């Protein structure tokens, strides 16, 4: 099985700064508390509070390139669901573990140890990032960096499509769990 | 290879001689605990995929602590669904409405959760079990993975070791330290990383700290996003445990700091979060409509005992509704037998059944628009205990009792005994 869109992808980099929170940054807090899960309802409000036009500039395969502590705050996933539906990927200098876990749950690929990534990538640059090897190339300047890759165990969850896909795969491998227990 | 206490407990749970921070692991829990509020959701998610049973149901414990009193038609339906699902899944134990007590206290009281154990729990405040030296990992919305597969992936966290020295001044308790530490860690004042770190308490003052106080500290710090909070092994009733799991002397702590308990005064957490702690002087005098004792961080017998000592022979202010929520049925029983219940009722308190009390969304004692409360709740974000524009202050049990008497936020050191 391969990651949706492949491990290596090319797209435009959209730069965000440090400490962008999920709630009230990536997505409006009222959509979080309303527990909206439908991407069609979430996408129109993605990044509203940090850059209202960004959602119109991104195209599938593009990269959100953030600084330290991306998706900080409580580990909700509404913004991640919208980003996944848009086919986005994340490169950032760091991400709280709870948010990384939530992103993995919705199969949003995130490379989270890209130290100094904004030093060689500018907003709007075309880049190539290989989430398998960790190599990120600025196609405009030709500069590249190798970052720590995604752990093997997490790659397989991303390939299966996050929590739901992983649970479906587990059920296929353990068909007894689809049989009601004897009373 | 020297290891921290957390690394040892996780290594044991994956059957390896050692683990190190950053390792991706799938530890095997001895027990899986869920509360009544998420059973239906997890069941629906699994059923939609085609699951009709769960893996190792005998290890799964469901406790009812959020909706202990069914105050709405929806709560009645939820209780009914939980009964049906517990039977369908054939879980190891199901504690129904009014049975048992708080899911972060009752399992220690009964001995289900013991020092040195690794378990997985739905709710983040399972870190309470660190008070006796058990490692409970929070699953949150990933709990269906645990129910289906028996485990879930995690990453071994770094450990921040905090050595405690000295002794609290009169009127100051671990809950105060919890608020102060939450503020100083999250503001960066202590200059150490805390996000997703295990906070391990050590030193003379931690070793001698009673379980009720340890729970208060474990509970409060959880709100700022630490991975877990651990204390040296101790039984729930306070007996030392020979050969328990502790950090090696040369364990690779990411950082290590020492705190003197003696320099601390009572704290109050302003509405918004436990990390919004201030010295009590800043909040003194704010009139309160409601005071609440109990919830997972302050629901132990000793919490009520201290508050009752301050309250005995006094009556609460006429403008205050004062609710008392024992952590478990056994604690409520002990309060009745020792006379604490009478002390509280003589003062004008109202008892709620053992469990979360109004900290779980205002159940049983909600706040109205614009009202002010002071409580020992786990947290105090907008809308936590009812109306979104209500103000929720947090404090130690004695500060809450002092404030209930005065009808305004008050310093427990200034109450005549």
Image (cartoon, coloured by chain):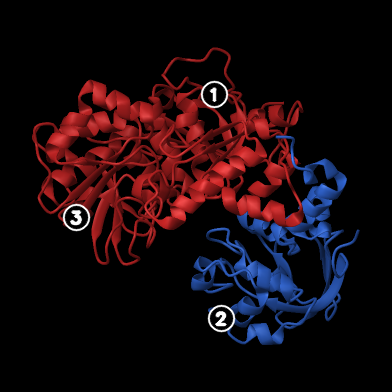
B38 vs B222, nearest the viewer = B38
User: Is disc 3 surrounded by few (<14), some (14 to 19) or many (20+) residues within 10 Å?
Assistant: many
Query: Can the viewer see residue B19?
Result: yes
**Residue at the spot of label 1:** B114
Name the residue nearer the viewer: B48 or B325. B48
Kindly indicate the quadrant of the structure image that contains residue B9.
Answer: top right
Q: Chain of mark 1?
A: B
In this view, which residue lies farthest toward the top?
Answer: B242
Q: Which chain is blue?
A: A
**Disc ID at residue B279:** none
* Foreground of the two, B63 or A23: B63
Which numbered circle lies on residue B288?
3
Tag 3 or tag 1, which sits nearer the N-term?
1
Picture quarter with the C terminus of chain B: top left
Which type of secondary structure does the marked residue at label 2 adopt? loop
Relative to B267, B140 lies left or right: right
Q: Check the residue under mark 3 and report the chain it is in.
A: B
Q: Secondary structure at mark 3?
A: loop
Count of number-bearing discs: 3
Query: Where A175 sits versus A158, above or below?
Result: above
| Residue identified by numbered label 2 | A48
Is disc 1 in contact with disc 3, using a CB cutoff of under 8 Å? no
Label 1 neighbour load within 10 Å: few <14, some 14-19, many 20+: many
Question: Which chain, by letter, is red?
Answer: B
- Which of the two discs, 2 and 1, sits closer to the camera? 1
**Marks 3/2: CA distance?**
38 Å
* Residue count near mark 2 (Cα–Cα under 10 Å), binned few <14, some 14–19, many ≥20: some
Residue drawn at x 75%, y 62% is A107
Q: Is residue A51 above or below residue B158?
A: below
Question: Outermost residue toward the right?
Answer: A1
């Amino acid at each position: 099985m391969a990651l949706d869109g492949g491990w290596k992808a090319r797209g435009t980099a959209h730069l965000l700064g440090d400490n962008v929170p999920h709630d009230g940054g990536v997505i409006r807090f009222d959509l979080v508390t309303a527990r909206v899960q439908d991407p069609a309802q979430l996408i129109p409000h993605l990044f509203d509070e940090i850059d209202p036009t960004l959602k119109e500039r991104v195209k599938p395969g593009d990269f959100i390139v953030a600084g330290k502590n991306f998706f900080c705050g409580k580990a909700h996933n509404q913004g991640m669901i919208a980003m996944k539906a848009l086919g986005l990927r994340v490169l950032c200098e760091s991400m709280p573990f709870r948010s990384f876990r939530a992103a993995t749950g919705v199969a949003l690929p995130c490379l989270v140890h890209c130290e100094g990534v904004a030093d060689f990538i500018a907003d709007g640059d075309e880049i190539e990032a290989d989430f398998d090897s960790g190599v990120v190339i600025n196609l405009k300047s030709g500069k590249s960096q190798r970052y720590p890759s995604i752990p093997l165990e997490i790659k397989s969850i991303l390939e299966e499509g996050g929590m739901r896909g992983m649970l479906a795969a587990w059920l296929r491998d353990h068909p007894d769990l689809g049989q009601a227990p004897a009373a | 290879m020297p290891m921290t206490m957390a690394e040892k407990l996780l290594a044991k749970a994956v059957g390896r001689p050692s683990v190190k921070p950053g390792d991706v692991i799938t530890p095997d829990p001895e027990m899986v605990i869920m509360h009544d509020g998420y059973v239906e959701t997890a069941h629906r998610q699994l059923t939609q995929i085609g699951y009709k049973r769960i893996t190792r149901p005998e290890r799964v414990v469901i406790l009812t602590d959020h909706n202990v009193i069914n105050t709405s038609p929806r709560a009645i339906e939820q209780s009914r669904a939980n009964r049906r699902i517990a039977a369908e899944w054939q879980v190891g134990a199901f504690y129904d409405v009014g049975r048992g007590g708080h899911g972060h206290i009752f399992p220690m009281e009964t001995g289900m959760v013991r020092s040195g154990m690794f378990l997985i729990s739905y709710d983040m405040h399972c870190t309470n079990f660190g008070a006796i030296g058990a490692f409970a990992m929070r699953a949150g919305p990933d709990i269906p993975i645990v129910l289906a597969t028996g485990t879930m992936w995690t990453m071994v966290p770094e450990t921040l070791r905090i050595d405690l020295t000295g002794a609290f001044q009169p009127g100051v308790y671990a809950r105060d330290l919890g608020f102060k530490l939450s503020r100083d860690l999250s503001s960066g004042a202590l200059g150490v990383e805390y996000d997703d770190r295990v906070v391990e308490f050590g030193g003379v003052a931690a070793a001698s700290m009673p379980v009720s106080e340890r729970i208060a500290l474990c509970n409060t710090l959880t709100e700022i996003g630490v991975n877990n909070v651990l204390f040296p092994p101790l039984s729930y009733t306070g007996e030392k445990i020979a050969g328990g799991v502790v950090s090696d002397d040369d364990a690779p702590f990411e950082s290590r700091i020492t705190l003197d308990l003696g320099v601390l005064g009572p704290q109050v957490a302003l509405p918004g979060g436990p990390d919004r702690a201030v010295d009590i002087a800043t909040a003194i005098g704010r009139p309160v409509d409601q005071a609440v004792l109990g919830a997972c961080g302050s629901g132990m017998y000793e919490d009520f005992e201290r508050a009752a000592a301050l309250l005995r022979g006094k009556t609460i202010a006429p403008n205050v509704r004062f609710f008392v929520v024992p952590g478990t049925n056994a604690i409520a029983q002990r309060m009745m037998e020792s006379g604490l219940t009478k002390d509280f009722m003589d003062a004008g308190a109202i008892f709620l059944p053992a469990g979360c009390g109004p900290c779980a969304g205002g159940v049983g004692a909600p706040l109205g628009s614009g009202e002010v409360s002071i409580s020992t709740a786990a947290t105090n974000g907008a809308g936590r205990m009812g109306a979104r524009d209500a103000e929720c202050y947090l404090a130690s049990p004695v500060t809450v009792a002092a404030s209930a008497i005065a009808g305004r936020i008050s310093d427990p050191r200034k109450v005549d005994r």
